[in-house]
Amino acid sequence: MSKVTVTTLQAHKAAGEKFSVIAAYDATFAGLIEEAGIEVILVGDSLGMVVQGHSSTLPVTMDEMVYHTGCISRGCKAPLIIGDLPFGSYSTLEQTLTNAAALMRAGANMVKLEGGEWLLESITAMTERGIPVCAHLGLTPQSVNAFGGFKVQGRNSDQAAAILEDAKRVEAAGASMLVLECIPSELAVQITQALSIPVIGIGAGADTDAQVLVLYDMLGLCGHKPKFVRNFLADNDSVQSALKAYNDAVKEGTFPAAEHGFS
Ligand code: KIV
Ligand code: NA
């Protein structure tokens, strides 16, 4: 696989070819993910929960995100690497630009942040400065306290309309990609069709342009299995074959199945 870029992913969307994404945090797994043919590695702040053992992503720091972005970047060549800006690291425009640049220097090819409307100016400023942006809407885990728990978003029609509107606005502001987390599958289809940038789903049904899962979830290593997760190690005898099975299932459209989505 040659280096995956924003252009590659845009071409996949235009051709109607699905691609796959894994959230991972270290060099050894980065190499295995690349070997499986997975296009994108997200260095997610989910590491606060699955690596550090916190009950939310809020305690994760910029230094930790830079460290793990470096670990991933040294472990693979081809996958496009997205680095997450952690909670509280993009509250002002200046802080956002400084921190996004730090993730890019650590090896990220794109930077992700959570939210819509309030980030439009930041998204434009990052894009203008050569930092491709991935937006993130729906269940944005950094807002767990505001949501009153990890709950599916966009279930009533006002909320759904607001998420669709935010999606259009982040694209217009310059975002190159969008993650939709835990929203009804019907809403995710609507957003995916309305946007020309690739849309990555997690708990958002089968009809987004791409899928993402947290590595340890798709290997069945976490105690609690969310509804949208499939354990790919259950029917495979190695991590390597589980990653290949995930990549194949996403591309063939056999994962996620209807049972993994919300209505
Ligand atoms: O941190 C993360 O792993 C994420 C994905 C679940 C989208 O943001
Ligand atoms: Na994240």
Image (spheres, rainbow, N blue to C red):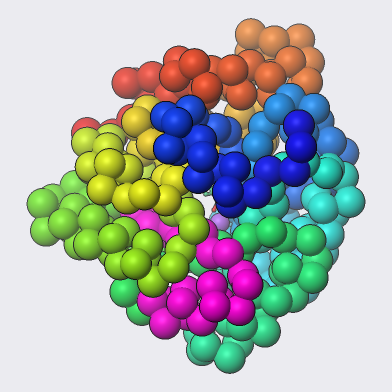
Q: Nearer the viewer, residue 222 or 252?
A: 252
Judge from the rendering whether residue 24 lies leftward or rightward of residue 143; answer left or right.
right
Residue 216 in the image: x percent, y percent?
A: 67, 35
Residue drawn at x 80%, y 27% as measured from the top left: 35
**Residue 112 seen in render:** yes
What residue range appears in magenta?
Answer: 119-140
Locate ligand 2 by image quadrant: bottom right
Residue 188 in the image: x percent, y percent?
A: 29, 41
Residue 218 in the image: x percent, y percent?
A: 61, 29
**Quadrant where the N terminus is found in the figure:** top right
Judge from the rendering whether residue 250 lies leftward or rightward of residue 106; answer left or right.
left
Quadrant position of residue 77: top right
Q: Nearer the viewer, residue 178 or 238?
A: 178
Report if residue 127 lies within the magenta region.
Answer: yes
Judge from the rendering whether residue 241 lies leftward or rightward of residue 223; answer left or right.
right
Report if residue 198 lies within the magenta region.
Answer: no
Total numbered badges shown on the rendered structure = 0
Residue drawn at x 32%, y 74% as measured from the top left: 117
Residue drawn at x 79%, y 70% as measured from the top left: 105
Outermost left residue: 157
Against 8, residue 36 (above or below) is above
**Residue 151 seen in render:** no
Judge from the rendering whether residue 117 lies leftward or rightward of residue 213; answer left or right.
left
Against 207, residue 68 (above or below) is below
Residue 210 in the image: x percent, y percent?
A: 48, 36
Residue drawn at x 34%, y 54% as measured from the top left: 138
**Quadrant where the C terminus is found in the figure:** top left
